[in-house]
Image (tube, rainbow, N blue to C red):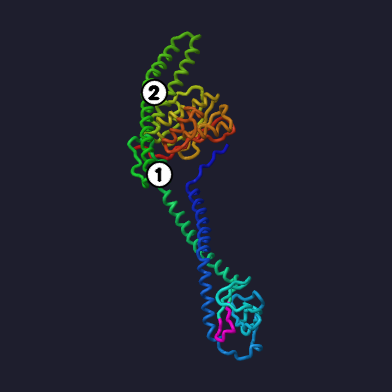
Amino acid sequence: MKPLTPPSIRTRLTRALLVSSVLWIVAVAAAVWLTVHDEVDELLDDTLQAAAEGLRGPLSQPLAVEPAAAAVTPAASGSGRFAWQVVDHLAAGEARTVAASALAPAAPLRRVPSGGFSDSDEWRVFGIPLADGRRWLYVAQTHAERQEALAETALSAALATLAIALLAQVWLQAQIRHELLPLQRLAQHLGGRDPEDIGAALGAAERSELQPVHAAIDELTRRLALRLARERAFTGHAAHSLRTPLAGIDAQLAVALRESPADLQPRLQRVRTAARRLHRVVSALLTLFRSSAAVHPQELDVAEMIPRLAVEGLAFEFPDRLRLTADADLLAAALLNLFDNSLRHGASRVRLSLLDRNVLRVHDDGTGVRPEQRESLQTALGGRVDASVGGLGLLLVDLVARAHGGSLQLPAVEHGFAADLHLSPLQPAA
């Protein structure tokens, strides 16, 4: 089952800012609509009244034509947005339009003379009497125009708010990235930190909120370094204490093999083989203790190293020239563990070759491993999962490679088992 990806702080903050910006825009637009509704109505009413006062003087003068002949050219009802009429109110409730603007409706805006503001289905009307008292001036504006003015005001405010919100979003995004940089630098610092350095400290945090994290990491690192130091000290002491007795046991077994009867020699040889394997395990523990210490590289001929390793039961193939730069003790321990792994998997022949500069391949003719098992072994190297999956041998070889700045790779081969020991090109010690 694929592990769930944890949520991102940056993504969560971005979403929260986006939602808040949208809500902010809607709230501002609604607030503007409610706030300016009455103000815009009042402003438009003042405009109607001012227009009526301005037209009252000129339209109070006697018309140049008789009222019946006065030119009235109204537009179709509802097509005008702002209009005025001069209406002559006759007796018996009759009214006729004697003058009007081009967009005014054909019918009088008011049948009964009245001043001030009033509303019809389509118009907002302001009336004012002219000088003779019989004729009235009506100035009107459509309700649609007033609603459009309100909508444009609210839309302008919403667009301005949107622009501000977008600018704020961009600025906050940049600010979030900037504020998260200390976490990234902390991760990079931890990635290059030596866990065995007891005296190492992260130092002062870049943000006050990170100070408890720094303190907790420093304390955890100190405890881990102390534990590693104690474990390595115990491993090294135990390995040193065991290697001398094992060498004595091997010497005594060699003497016993020469002096014992022929029927006992196979059993003694098996005991000596087990003792030598135990000696290699002790050497592996010593190498594991040294793998994080200083490396002493030198020019080595691997072909010359093989006889000194005293590995029984394997035939070796290698080119005439098999030279690379490495720490002799660490490389010897790595090869011993690879050869021991070959023996345990039924190999009888091992071929060594250089794939590239300081890339040594060890390929045996043993039973090998299944593809999925090889992938599990590769994953186990470097401590990414339980090291017991790969055993002590391959783990130690990987530690030797990493001590040289490289890694151990397990390539897929048709027959047997292969291990590529990648060693960074180091300068030989002076």
* Residue 109 locus on image (x, y percent): 62, 77
- Label 2 or label 1, whichever lies nearer to me, is 1
Q: In the rendered image of this protein, does residue 83 appear above or below residue 226? A: below
Q: Which residues fall within the magenta stretch?
A: 129-139
163 or 416, nearer to the observer: 163
* Residue 205 locus on image (x, y percent): 36, 45
* Residue 386 locus on image (x, y percent): 49, 30
Query: How many residues crowd mark 2 within 10 Å: few (<14), some (14–19), many (20+)?
Result: many
Q: In the rendered image of this protein, does residue 166 appear above or below residue 135? A: above
68 or 333, nearer to the observer: 68
- Kind of residue at badge 2: Ala
User: The C terminus lies in which quarter of the figure?
Assistant: top left
**Residue located beneath label 2 in the image:** 239
Q: Is residue 332 left or right of residue 113?
A: left
Question: Quick one: which residue is furthest to the front in this view?
Answer: 92
Which secondary structure, mark 2?
helix
User: The N terminus lies in which quarter of the figure?
Assistant: top right
Q: Earlier in the sequence, mark 2 or mark 1?
A: 1
User: Residue 136 in magenta?
Assistant: yes
209 or 341, nearer to the observer: 209
**Residue located beneath label 1 in the image:** 186
